[in-house]
Amino acid sequence: GQLLDANAVDFALLALYFVFVLGIGYLARRAVSTSLDFFLSGRALPAWVTGLAFISANLGAIEIIGMSANGAEYGMPTMHYFWIGAVPAMLFLGVVMMPFYYGSKVRSVPEFMLRRFGRAAHLVNGISFAVAQVLIAGVNLYLLASIVNALLGWPLWLSVLLAAAIVLSYTALGGLSAAIYNEVLQFFVIVAALLPLTIIGLVKVGGVQGLVEKVSAGPGGAEQLSAWPGNQLTGFDNSVLSVVGLVFGLGFVLSFGYWTTNFVEVQRAMASKSMSAAQRTPIIGAFPKMFIPFIVIIPGMIAAVLIPELAAFKQAGGSGGGGVDYNDAILLLMRDLLPNGILGVALAGLLASFMAGMAANLSSFNTVFTYDIWQSYVVRDRADGYYLSMGRWVTVGATLAAVGTAFIAAGYSNLMDYLQQLFSFFNAPLFATFILGMFWKRMTPHAGWAGLVLGTVSAVVVFGLSETGVLDLPGQGASFVGAGVAFVVDIVVSVVVSLVTRPKPAAELVGLVYGLTPRASLQASTSGEDAGWYRRPGLLAGIALVLIIALNIIFG
């Protein structure tokens, strides 16, 4: 049945928002004449646009519903997903990795793998990335459909199809530009939706002091008010182990693996118009990123003490009736706190976030599938127009596949658990291969694919052992451990295989390996459009790092 009581004003606002979204798709369509335009916006976008899109692509359903669910369940330690688990890696991507990506003019992350390790690693990476994107697009689609279901009371399958049709229409029309300009619009709509919700919520619980008292009195207690050591989140009883798990498992392996090799994010920076703009993309994104938890996690914590059904659910240790779970935190808060009109804006914001997330999955999937699988292994050497129309058809196919995977996601009560599992399978081993291959020129093509395959297999084994109860890892511990194991196995396998196989000649690795690349080609320009101290990537990254350390101290 219906959860939310929306009226004509709310629906009018939603309709207006959709007119904008489809309009942007239509206008971007007119700028698409080659496949590079469709897949990488012709490399012509300014840094502030790609920077906001960089955040918005990640500010999908997962971020908003998943992090508010985590906030409701674990409280402040969830901040780590942003402060330890995102910003340091984003700065590293901007300062260290981006010059390689942008400078080598590759069109995708698997293409970088092709040039560094050859065809086997390329194919393994292309396929595993494509599978991951379809699984994650399913999560976004499932959440999008559950909103439609809450609004109109339509059955889930019908809502899934409707939601899929909307995202498909603008992504297939305008390609990456349509996705990126919509993401910038979506960023502002999302903030406009969540800021009033947080403020009204804080007023309702009696300000910050009221929230502190109510959380301390509830299940989980005062531990949920400080970010460290985060024992409940990691599932470790020992505080030292918990901190190590967070810093190594989340802060290093999972987050560097995600931000630096995940093509969904990197694709946005590749679309910018110069090396300096490409480097600034993730660094500009880091500033809003560190403040987003205040409008995502705090509402989750408020919902867990303010909304009777959710408070009862938490009191019962995450079971109990009423048909609610942690994923509903933000919807329940909207239902109880927002007047009509503001509710319309809030719903547009939620729909926007899911569509941004899903469009990002689709636009990166169609690039990798078309360039890295179809053009490389199936139908080679055709005219560019063929790959452009192929890209549009692939988008349709991916959307249909996501409709299928949406029903897998429906089985999890906290979707963050599911997602972290997927990241430990796909991203942790990729990051290990990448970072080793970038700094160690001796690493061989055989090591490239062998490490990836065995790293992924080992993460799946950890998952299996934890599911069957051989390993006891509650919370998101299984994915932190799985990611760590995958990383270590990948490195060990890569080193051993490299020592018994033949490396590529050094001449073929220029631009792909750190020690063999001339410094000048990794330097961004500082003149013309890139002039001015406030456009220097290193300086901006330094400011962001200082802010992050301060936030960790204040809320630690």
Image (spheres, rainbow, N blue to C red):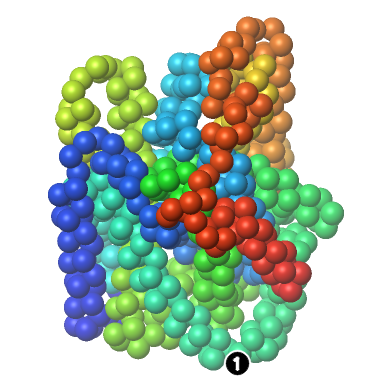
Tell me which amino acid carries mark 1. Answer: Gly
In this rendering, position of residue 179 left or right of residue 226: left
Q: Which residue occupies 48% across, 35% down?
A: 103
In this rendering, position of residue 121 left or right of residue 348: right
| Secondary structure type for disc 1 | loop
Q: Where is residue 358 in the image (x, y as percent from the top left)?
A: 35, 51
Depth check: 538 or 526 in front?
526
Q: Which residue occupies 47% across, 64% down?
A: 64
Depth check: 535 or 77 in front?
535
Locate residue 548: give its quadrant: bottom right
**What quarter of the picture does the N terminus occupy?**
bottom left
* Up/down of 530 relative to 19, above or below: above
- The residue carrying mark 1 is 206
Q: Which residue occupies 58% across, 89% down?
A: 205
In this rendering, position of residue 306 left or right of residue 17: right
Q: Is disc 1 surrounded by few (<14), some (14 to 19) or many (20+) residues within 10 Å?
A: few
Q: Position of residue 466 (x, y in %)?
A: 65, 40
Locate residue 491: give its quadrant: top right
Q: Which residue occupies 53% across, 44% down?
A: 524
How many numbered discs?
A: 1
Evaluate whether residue 525 shows in this view.
yes
Evaluate whether residue 412 shows in this view.
no
* Up/down of 132 relative to 242, above or below: above
**What quarter of the picture does the C terminus occupy?**
bottom right
Depth check: 517 or 391 in front?
517
Locate residue 220: give its quadrant: bottom right
